[in-house]
Amino acid sequence: MKGQALLAVACGGMIGALARYGVDGLLAGTTFALQATLLVNVIGAFGLGYMTPKQWANRDGWYTCLTTSFFGSFTTFSTVYLQWFEWFTYGLVKEVFIYGTAMLGCGFVAAGIGYYASKWKEKKR
């Protein structure tokens, strides 16, 4: 990996982690605090979906910076699994199922919307 690409990956990861921390901070103490993980994962799914089509196929440093680095540190599927496990241990089985279905379903739809939005933008050029 070239020095410039390595720097792009490091910066993208730092910015993504700070953005994730910022979302948590904004929603802490609100009724939406539990949805912070859902929100960042849906945004991340949209972003990755948007980045996927052919115009990003060259996979340059910016592509890696945005996909692997920014969205990789912004989204938090490890947090999702921990939340599900904690809720399960408290007997919130129904909530785990509902939240898990919402997380996966919304993420799938957001990735598709991002993908097709990118394709539509490319056709308009």
Image: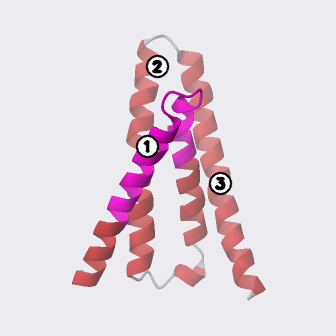
In the rendered image, the residue lying farthest to the right is: 124
Q: Please, is residue 115 above or below residue 75 in the view? A: below
The alpha-carbon separation of the residues under discs 2 and 1 comes to 15 Å
Q: Residue at x 56, y 28 (%)?
A: 30
Question: Tag 3, which secondary structure?
Answer: helix
Magenta span? 12-40
Say which quadrant the C terminus sits in: bottom right
Compared across the picture, whether 100 is left or right of 9 comes to: right
The alpha-carbon separation of the residues under discs 3 and 2 comes to 25 Å
> Can residue 123 be seen from the camera position used here?
yes
Q: Earlier in the sequence, mark 3 or mark 2?
A: 2
Q: Residue at x 74, y 76 (%)?
A: 120
The three-letter amino acid code for the residue at tag 2 is Trp
Measuring from the top left, give residue 81's x and y in whole percent: 42, 33
Q: Residues within 10 Å of mark 1 (few under 14, many from 20)?
A: some
Q: Residue at x 50, y 40 (%)?
A: 26
Question: Tag 2, which secondary structure?
Answer: helix
The three-letter amino acid code for the residue at tag 1 is Phe
Q: Nearer the viewer, residue 4 or 78?
A: 4
Residue annotated with mark 2: 87
Measuring from the top left, give residue 8's x and y in whole percent: 33, 75
Q: Please, is residue 3 above or below residue 92 in the view? A: below
Residue annotated with mark 3: 110
Q: Residues within 10 Å of mark 2 (few under 14, many from 20)?
A: some
Measuring from the top left, give residue 21's x and y in whole percent: 40, 46
| Dot 1 and dot 3 residues touching (CB under 8 Å) | no
Residue annotated with mark 1: 77
Q: Please, is residue 7 above or below residue 12 in the view? A: below
- Residue 35 covered by magenta stretch: yes
Say which quadrant the N terminus sits in: bottom left
